[in-house]
Image: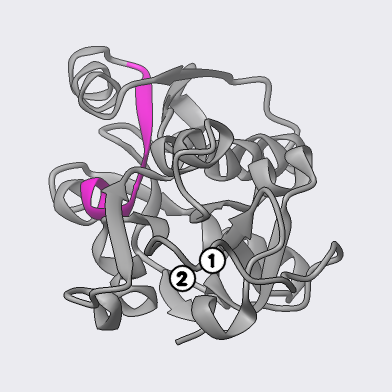
C-alpha cells in the first residue's frame, strides 16, 4: 500500500484557518507506507506530529487532541469528518501491507483474527468474504495477539496491516492481499486512509 493521490471522496472540504496562536497538531500513521504523507513535516516549528496506529490517530481526532489526522476512511465517513482531498493512503492492486496470513489455505480457515488498528481493513475483509460466500468468523484483536493466535490455532488466520504485515508475510505459508483481491473483483482502486478534521482548517497548512 502506498501513499498516493486518493480518488475523490464525497464530503465537505477543509476551508478555514485554525487558531494562529499554536502549531498545527497532526496525528499521523507511523507505518512505512504512510510516511511519505508526513515525513517532510518533521522538524517544522509550526507543526506537532503525533505518530500512532490508524485507530489511535482517529481517537486523538475524536478527542479533539489534534487538528488533523490521517485516519481510516471508514471512520472518516462514519463521523462525517471534513476531508482534505487529493492525498491519502490508496492502492490499485497488491500492496503487501494489508494481508490475511495463515499456515493453512484460506478455504480451511474457520476464524480470522483481525488487527483492530484499522476498521477499514476489517470492513474490506468482511466485504470480500461475503463476495466469496464465506461464513468465517472475524474477531478483532490487538496486533500481537492476532498474529499469535493465527500461529497457535490450527485453522486460524490473522489480518495484519502496515509494518506488522510487512514483517509477518514471510512467516506464514499462505497470504491473501486484500487490496489485490478488491482490484481483481472491481477493477477499482481502494482508499484505506484520508486526512480528516473535525472542523475546517486551512488547506495551505494541511497540504504543505
Q: Which numbered disc covers residue 94?
A: 2
Count of numbered circles on the image: 2
Give the percent coordinates (x, y) of residue 129: 66, 36
- Could you tell me residue 107's position as x and y percent? 51, 32
Mark 1 burial class by Cα count in 10 Å: few <14, some 14-19, many 20+? many
In the image, what residue occupies the spot 70% across and 53% down?
199
SS state under label 1: helix
Q: Which residue is mark 1?
A: 180
Query: What's the colour scheme?
Result: one colour
User: What stretch of residues is rendered in magenta?
Assistant: 155-165
* Mark closest to the chain's N terminus, 2 or 1: 2
The C terminus lies in which quarter of the figure? Answer: bottom left
Above/below status of 194 relative to 162 = below
Please give the label number shown on residue 111: none
Q: Is any atom of residue 192 visible in this view?
A: no
Left or right of residue 101, residue 151 in this image: left
Amino acid at each position: 500500500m502506498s501513499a498516493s493521490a486518493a480518488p475523490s471522496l464525497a464530503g465537505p472540504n477543509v476551508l478555514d484557518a485554525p487558531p494562529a496562536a499554536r502549531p498545527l497538531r497532526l496525528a499521523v500513521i507511523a507505518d512505512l507506507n504512510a510516511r511519505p504523507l508526513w515525513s517532510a513535516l518533521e522538524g517544522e516549528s509550526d507543526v506537532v506530529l503525533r505518530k500512532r496506529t490508524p485507530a489511535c490517530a482517529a481517537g486523538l481526532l475524536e478527542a479533539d487532541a489534534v487538528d488533523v489526522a490521517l485516519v481510516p476512511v471508514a471512520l472518516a465517513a462514519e463521523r462525517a469528518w471534513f476531508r482534505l482531498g487529493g492525498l491519502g493512503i490508496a492502492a490499485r492492486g497488491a500492496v503487501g501491507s494489508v494481508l490475511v496470513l495463515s499456515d493453512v489455505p484460506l478455504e480451511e480457515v474457520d476464524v480470522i483474527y483481525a488487527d483492530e488498528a484499522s476498521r477499514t481493513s476489517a470492513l474490506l475483509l468482511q466485504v470480500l468474504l461475503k463476495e466469496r460466500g464465506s461464513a468465517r468468523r472475524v474477531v478483532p484483536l490487538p496486533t500481537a495477539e492476532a498474529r499469535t493466535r493465527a500461529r497457535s490455532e490450527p485453522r486460524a488466520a490473522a489480518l495484519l496491516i502496515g509494518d506488522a504485515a510487512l514483517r509477518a508475510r514471510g512467516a506464514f505459508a499462505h497470504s491473501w492481499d486484500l487490496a489485490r483481491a478488491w482490484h481483481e473483483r472491481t477493477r477499482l482502486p481502494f482508499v484505506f486512509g484520508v486526512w480528516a478534521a473535525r472542523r475546517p482548517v486551512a488547506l495551505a497548512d494541511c497540504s504543505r
